[in-house]
Image: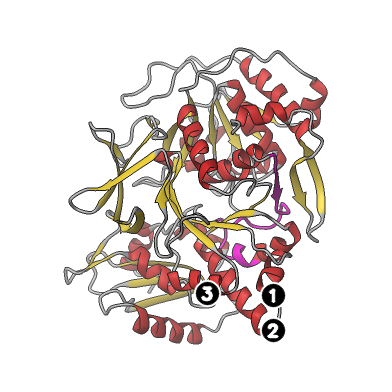
Amino acid sequence: MRTLEQALTALADDPRPLVEVLAADGSVAHALSYRDGVAAASALAAELRARPVAGRGPRPDGDPTDPGQLHVGVVMGNSPEFVVADLAVLAAGAAQVPVPLAFTAEQAASMLAEVDICLVDAEGREQLAAWGRDQVLPSAAALEVVDIGRLIAAGPLPGGSPPEPDRICKVIHTSGTTSRPKGVCIRAAGLDALLTSLRDAMPAYAYRRYLSLVPFSLLIEQVTGIYLVVCDGGTVVLLPPDVPLVGTSSFAPEAVLPYLAAARPTALVATPALAESLAARAAAAQAAGRSPADELFGSPEAPLVCCGGAPVDPRTLEKLDGYGIAVYEGYGLSENSSVVSWNTPAARRIGTVGRPLAHVRVTTAADGELLVRSSSLFAGYKGGDPSGCEVDADGWLHTGDLAEIEDGYLRIKGRKKSVIITAAGRNVAPEWVEAQYRTVPGIRAVAVVGDGLPALHGLFLLDPAADADAVRDRLDSVARARLSQVERVEVAHLLPADEALHAEYFTVTGRPRRAVIQQAVTTGRLA
């Protein structure tokens, strides 16, 4: 089984498409071949190796990054330029710092504080201007718009010596206890270990045509949408630039559905909200006498659909199974270079997040916290972070997630820190409750809070076309049928979904900002 580097070498002269970008009508607007993509990445890598590194002093305690290593900010949308930049930074031995375009200026500035150069595409250049370049980039940092045509024309350049295998290759954002994200330092050797296990676990050549639906700034999408695709010699298919990516907008799950059939993917990664939309569309197709798989994916055979980030109601997965569409739920966290466990076609149990990958070991602590030990664990946090996960003296990562292990399968029960303790002293795991309410048609996003309050509050962002009274009745019906009295939302805040609300109350990965929502509840903003 070839490595990512070996795959790129083998594909360097291949005319097949590495990237295809869809047009609004679902046709291919333009494509980037492996030949041109590898050439451009090689040229950019050579330019990065020649760049000077800023004179940074010794790292703060707990910061594993090398002050002499080039730090490269990547502010881009899902574009061919991102793919080229990502592969170039890996080849150059630099540390990549990808920044979501949905970040605030303050969040972007905290991630880009020590970059030597920032690479942007057209969308990233616009966002950088909106943030204010001087507000988010260090004064000494260079700015470069990645021009693939120029890089291809530059021709082959000296390759340089191979990068250190255990270097820090990425600094990935993850949420902290403040509005500023933590920087998770990913080791190149750890990323290689993860890719090896994933390729062993997943069906051969499943990623020969992958539809990218979530931002490339997320490590999981770099892993599945770029590296696994390259290892399979496949093509990553990108949505039209004006279609919102899943997780960045409450409208995205419905907006991307028409492009599933147009892309004819063999694999994709979905979110729970998209899984609910798939189930609803499949039900409508079957009721109309049409094949759900044909309707959704333009093929009688459904692709490999993987899902993670938050719990999916098992009923939804069972419904999709009945339509011939298997969704494989998994679990991961940036501190393990993304994936810890995943259901696969060879080993699947609905209601769990699958078995650990081959290089991962798991156990639970006395209080039920999931502990992970693997060769893909992170090296630490950029600058250290008191709110981060700890690795104990025996090498176990304390994930902060509550879990059960049954027959080798992991079942995630919720976050230790997000467990709600009501004023009555009752404990509620909000993730499970949210998964039940998310099945209600018309719900775009949901969050449950209530720490120290006499009742649970629920924030529900609705499709603007939905009947609020009908949705409220359905929420009550789901609560009575599936939730205990303690788990039921007593105070429901139903608001029409819009981009500003989604950005204020949910992260770029779609997770609720519970502290922000709780404050809005207690101050009466959501009354």
Are the residues at dot 3 and dot 2 in contact (C-beta closer than 8 Å)? no
**Residue 356 placement, left or right of 84:** left
Span shown in magenta: 233-254
Residue 76 visible (yes or no): yes
| Residue 291 numbered tag | 1
146, 296: nearer the viewer: 296
For the point 39% across and 35% down, the residue is: 377
Are the residues at dot 2 and dot 1 in contact (C-beta closer than 8 Å)? no
Residue 56 placed where, x, y %?
Answer: 45, 17
- Look at label 3 and name its amino acid: Lys
- Look at label 2 and name its amino acid: Ala
**Residue 163 placement, left or right of 339:** right
- Dominant secondary structure of the residues highlighted in magenta in the image: loop
In space, the residues marked 2 and 1 are separated at their CA atoms by 9 Å
147, 327: nearer the viewer: 327
Residue 525 visible (yes or no): no
Q: Is mark 1 on a helix, strand or loop?
A: loop
- Look at label 1 and name its amino acid: Ser
In space, the residues marked 1 and 3 are separated at their CA atoms by 14 Å
The residue beneath circle 2 is: 288
